[in-house]
Image: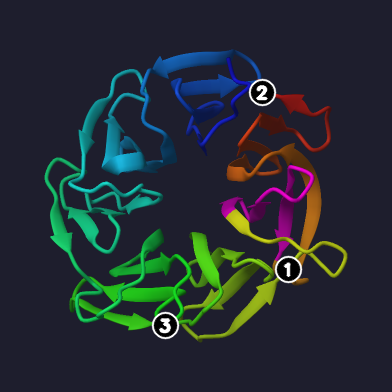
Amino acid sequence: MFHKGATAVMASVTLGYFVAVKDEGIFHFSAEEGWKRLFRVKSRIHVLTYIGPYIFAAGEKGAVLRSADQGKTWTVSRFPTSASVWAVAGRNDGFVCAHGTYCLYLSDDFGVTWHVAKPFSQLKEPPVIRSLCLHGQTIYIGTRIHMNHGSIWAYDLTEDRIRRISRERQRMTASMMMYQNDWLIAAKGAAKGERGEVAVRNVRTQEEFAITAGPAVREKSFLDVSEDNGIIYVTSSQDENGFSRIYQADLAAGELKWFDTIRGHGWRVANREENFFCAGLYESKFVRPYEAVRLAH
């Protein structure tokens, strides 16, 4: 059933992981209990995340799913967009943000009602939104490759104002997360012939640096980043042989340390300390680094 791989994953607050499988739906997986289907959905899910007491899932053609009971039941709705939703973020007070092609969808009641914000309304050729990271009253917006307006923007919710904090002409920002309240970590994918990187920026001091996989490995793209208890994992796109890699990021050393390999793109990764689950294009893999690897398909 799982030979097609998975498209999204997140760690459960109790046990195991929630996993979205293409054409199959949303499942729960744990090493102790195996696989259990929670909800059948044909839409491809690109992101799973906790916001307050809810689980949110979102994906292709504006699909948005929400569960208030740890995945037992779900409500399904859609944003008025044909775009894929790659990112949803929020706070415990009910604020939720998601994205369309160029706009943001904002909610103050855990996704019951939504309104639209257009942070790029002043740009004649706006970039396509690819990732989001919420930090206080600021939404960090990562874009697809755009020659004039690509990279990361900071949208101030209080003042309804946007500013560009980094510039990229040849890279997209596939995924972002905030680490230790100050460090914005971004997984970036590159245009053909260029090299992907993991960009790290202190949003308070503006200090920034990049981490790559080292001179021996030229990753075209990094796709996702996950952190738990100070341990950070990063996934890559597949290489010419059809395999991608999962790295552990050491920010202090400025290094990506190779940990494992998976067939196809490493779409998403979620971890509980050293243990991680990678949702890959062709296979899903649950890894306890100091035990035998388990293929979750």
Looking at numbered disc 2 in the image, what kind of residue is underneath it? Ala
- The image quadrant where one finds the N terminus is top right
Q: Residues within 10 Å of mark 1 (few under 14, many from 20)?
A: some
Q: Is residue 265 left or right of residue 40?
A: right
Looking at numbered disc 3 in the image, what kind of residue is underneath it? Asn
Give me the residue at 80% from left, 57% from top: 257
| Residue indicated by mark 3 | 148
Give me the residue at 74% from left, 72% from top: 254
Task: State the mark number for residue 90.
Answer: none
106 vs 268: above or below: below
Whether the magenta-drawn stretch holds residue 164 is answered as no
Q: Position of residue 98 (x, y in %)?
A: 29, 53
Marks 3, 1: nearer the viewer: 3
Q: Nearer the viewer, residue 225 or 129?
A: 129
Span colored in magenta: 224-250
Q: Position of residue 277 (x, y in %)?
A: 63, 35
Q: CA distance from mark 3 to mark 1?
A: 24 Å
Give me the residue at 52% from left, 79% from top: 169
